[in-house]
Image (spheres, coloured by chain):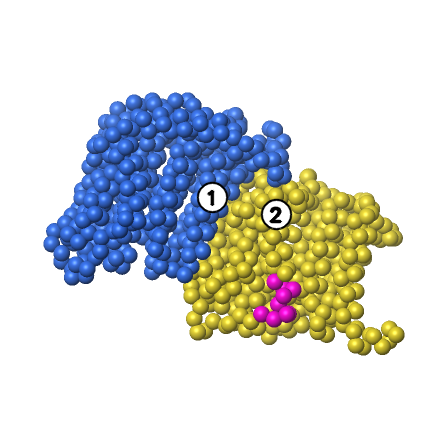
Chain colours: A blue, B yellow
Amino acid sequence: MFNVLGEDFYTVKDLAEVSFPAFFNLKYAIALDGLAGILILLNALLVIVVVIATYDLDSNKYRLYYFTIYALTWTVNGALLSKNLYFFYMFWEAMLIPLFLLIGIFGSDNRKFASFKFFLFTATGSLLLLTALIYLSTIQFKISGSYDLTADSIKAMQLPFNGFFSPQALVFWAFCIAFFIKVPVFPFHSWLPDAHVEAPTAGSIILAGILLKLGIYALLRFVIPVFPEAVTAYQDCIIILGLAGIVYGALTAISQSNIKKLCFLFNKSHGLYCSWNFYLKRKSNSGAIFQMVSHGLTTGGLSVVIHYLYIRRHTKEIAAYGGVAKVMPVFAVAFFMVLIGSMGVPLTNGFVGEYLITFGIYEKNMWYGIIAAFGVVLTPLYLVNLYYKTMLGPITDDHNKELTDINWVESTPFIILVVFIFYYGVYPLGLMKYFDVLAKFLMKA
Amino acid sequence: MLLFLVPKYGQYLSGFLNYLIPIIFGITIATNNSLQLTSLFQINSATNFKALGILNIFMLIIFILNGYLTKASTRNSIIAIFIYLGSIFLIGSTEFLSFFVSMEIIALLGYCLISVGGFKNSKDAAIKYFIQGSLAAAVFLLAMIFFYGATHSFNLVGFKVVNHDFYAISLSLFLISICFKLGIFPFHSWSIDVYPNVDKGVLGTNLLINKFFVGFVLVMLFQKLLLEADHRVQDIFNTIITTLALLSAFFGNIAGLAQKKIKRALAYSSVAHSGYILLALVIGINNNYEKEILFFLAFYSVSATLAFMIINYYLQNKENDTYDILKGGFYRDSKMATMLTIAILSLAGIPFTSGFTSKYIVFSGYFREGFAIAPLFIILSSAIGLGYYLKIIIPLFMEEADSTTQPLTTSIETFPMKFIALFLSCIIILGGVIPAFFL
C-alpha cells in the first residue's frame, strides 16, 4: 500500500506550449502530472462548495466577492499548470492579491491587520524565492542561453554541495523557507491563525484547502527531487520542525476559546505531512499526499460548519454555544461526520493518511514515531471537546433556542464532502489509482 | 487673416502645434538610422533612438495632460517643448559644453514649471530645487574643469586620459551631480518636495522627462566615463556606488514607511527606485545593459506618474494628502481605484505588472555580472517597502467612505487625465505579460 503511486504519477507531461513572446527565450509551457491534477480537481470541488455555502451572501459587494474567488482559482490553476519556475513564481505571488482583498474586504473586525500581516509574511518569503530564482536563471542563461528554468534543468545544473554556505544549500533553504511560510511549518506559522480567524468562509476554505497545499506541491515539485544532497543532509532538521509543529499546534488548540482559531490550529499538522515528504523522497509518501487531499476536504467541511454557526449567532466564542444539537439536528449530524473525518477515525479519509504517516515515521525512527502518534492522539481530544461544548448538553443561552436548522441548499456542501470523506476512507487504494488513471487521461486530452 | 485668428483661437492653434512638433520630430527620428547636425550633435546608437521614441510618446502624454483650454496649460506646454528640445540635444551631445548647456536648459525650465505646479507649496519646492540644483550645476562645472585637466579636451567621444588623478576627481564630482539628478539618498531632499507638489503635465514632465530621460542619459554617460578609468579607481567607485545604492534603497523604503502622507511616501519610493538603478552604473562597465536600464526607468516613470495622477484625482485640490482621502475609493470610483491598484502593485514589483518584469530584468543583470550580496539586500529592502504600498491599497478597498471624505467631481478637464490613466495602466499590464514586446 505504500507504493501505490507509480512513476507515472510524478512524470510531468507537457500539455501545450504557448509561445507568446516573453523574454530571454522564455515560453509559457503548460504541463501536468498526477499531483497537480489532484489539486486542480480539489480546487474545482472546493470552489463549488464555497459558492454553494455562501449563496446568501449578505453584501452589496458581491461582484468583488466572486471576482476575488475566481481570480484566486485562476492563479492557483496557473501555478499548478506551469512547468517553468518563472511562471510558477508569477502565479505564486499574484495569488496573494485576490486573497489579500478577500480577507481584507469580507473578513471580520480585525481584517485589515490580518490581511496586511498575511501579505507581508508571504510576500517576504516569496522574495527569498525570487532571489534564488534569479540566481538559478543566471546560471541557466550561461548554460543554455535562455531563462527557461524547469525542475529538470535545475537538477541538471548539479549545484555543488559542501556545507551550509554552498550554493545548493543556500538555494535549498531559500526555496524551503519560501514554501514553509506558505505551508506553514512550525516557526513560520504566525500569520496563519490571524488570517484564518479574520478571513470570510470563502477565504478560509480556499486558504486551507488549496493555498497551503500549494506549498507542499511546490516542495514536491521544485525542492525534493531537485536538491538530493541537501535533502539528505537536512531532512532530520526539517522533520523535527514538523514534529514540533504538530505538538505545539495540538497543545495550543486545547486552550482556545475561539472556534475558528481552534479548528485551524489543526492545520499545523500540515508541517508534519510536508516534512515527511523529505524523509522518504519518492518512496511511500503516498500517505502524505493522501492526507494533503483529505485534509483539504475536511477543513473545507469545518469552515462550512463554522460559517453556518456564525451567520446564525454572529459569534465565534465556544462559550456562546451549547446544546445546539437539540435545535439543529441535521446540522449536528453533518458536523459530526466532518468531525470524525478530521479526527482520523477509521473508515474515514483522515485515518488512512494519519495511519500511513505515523507508521512510516515509526518505522524510520521510534522516537519520532512516538511524538507523531502523540500529536495524532491529541487531535481528537480538542475536537471532541469542541463538539461536546457546542452541540451537546443543555441549552445554556436563550439565543440558541431560536436557531433554525440548515435547509437543503445549505446541506449540499456537506453531502458532497461527506461522500468523499467516507468513500476515500473505505476505499483509499481505489482513490489513488483513480487519480493516477485520471492523470493519464488528462495527459491525453 | 491669421492676425484675426490668433487672438481668438491662438490657444487652440498653439495646442495643435504642441501635438504637431513631437509628431514631426518622432517621424524624423524614426526614419533615420543616424542623425548628425554638427560635430557637436550626433545620435547613432539604436538604444538612443529607442529612448527618443519613448520620449516622443511621453511628450504626447504630457501635452494631453496639460490640455489646451487655459492660458496656463498653453504656457506649461510651451515650457515642456523647450525641455523636450533640451532633452534631444542632451542625448546627442558629443561634447561636454553642449551637454552642460542642454542639461541646464532642462533644469532651469524645470524650476519655472514646478513653481506653477498647482499646489500651495509648489513655489517653496521650486525654490528649494533651484538652490540645490544650482549647487549641483556648480559641481558639474567643476567636474568638467577637472575633466579638461585630465583629458585636455571636452570631447565625450574618443578622449584619452592623460592625468589619472584629475580624472578620478572629475568622476567623483560627476557622481555627486548624477546622484542629485537621480535623487539618491544624501542628495534626495529636493525630490521629496517636488513630486508631491506638482500636478498633471508638470508632474509628467518631472517624472517622464527628468526622471526617465535625464536619468538614462546620465547613467549611460557615467558608465562610458568609468570605463576609461584605471582598475584601482573602478574598484573604489564600485564600492562607493554599491554603498550609495544600498543606502538609498534602505533609506527610501524605511522613510517611506514612516510617512503619514501618501505622496511623500511615493516620493521616498522614488528614492528607493533610484537606488535600485544606481547599481546599474557598476554592472554596465564591461557589458552594456542599456536596454534593461531603459526598460526599468521608463516603466518606473510610467507607474509613478499613474500613481501620483490618480492620488491627485482623489485629492480633489485639497492640500492634506493623508491616507484617509482614499477611504472607500473603490466604491466611489471603481475604475480609477483599479488603475491606482495596478500602479501601486507595479511599484511594489508584484507579477503581471511591468514593475516585476523590469526589476527581474535588472536584478538578473546584477546577478549575471557576479554581484550577489548587494542585489540580495536590495531585494530585502523592497520587502520593507511593501508596507507602505499596502497602506495605499487598504483604504481603497477595505474602508468605507464617511462624512470627512471629499466627494469626487468629474468635469471635462478630468477626461484627458482619465484617458491617459487608462493608456498607462494598459501599458503597465502589457509590460508585465509580454515584456519582449517592449525590450
B218 within the magenta span:
no
Q: Secondary structure at mark 2?
A: helix
Residue sitting nearer the eye, A230 or B170: A230
Using the rendered image of the protein, determine whether residue B94 is visible from the camera's viewpoint.
no
For label 2, the residue is B431
Residue sitting nearer the eye, B259 or A212: A212
> Which range is magenta?
B410-418
- In the displayed structure, does residue A427 sit left or right of residue B112? left
For label 1, the residue is A74
- Type of residue at label 2? Gly
Label 1, label 2: how far apart the Cα atoms are: 20 Å
Coordinates of residue A415 in the picture (x, y in percent): 28, 42
Q: Quadrant of the C terminus of chain B?
A: top right
Name the residue at 45% across, 56% down: A63
- Asked if B34 appears above or below B390 in the picture, the reply is above
Coordinates of residue B341 in the picture (x, y in percent): 52, 56
- In the displayed structure, does residue B405 sit left or right of residue B29? left
Q: Quadrant of the N terminus of chain B?
A: bottom right
- Type of residue at label 1? Trp
Which numbered tag is attached to residue A277?
A: none
Residue A173, quarter of picture: top left
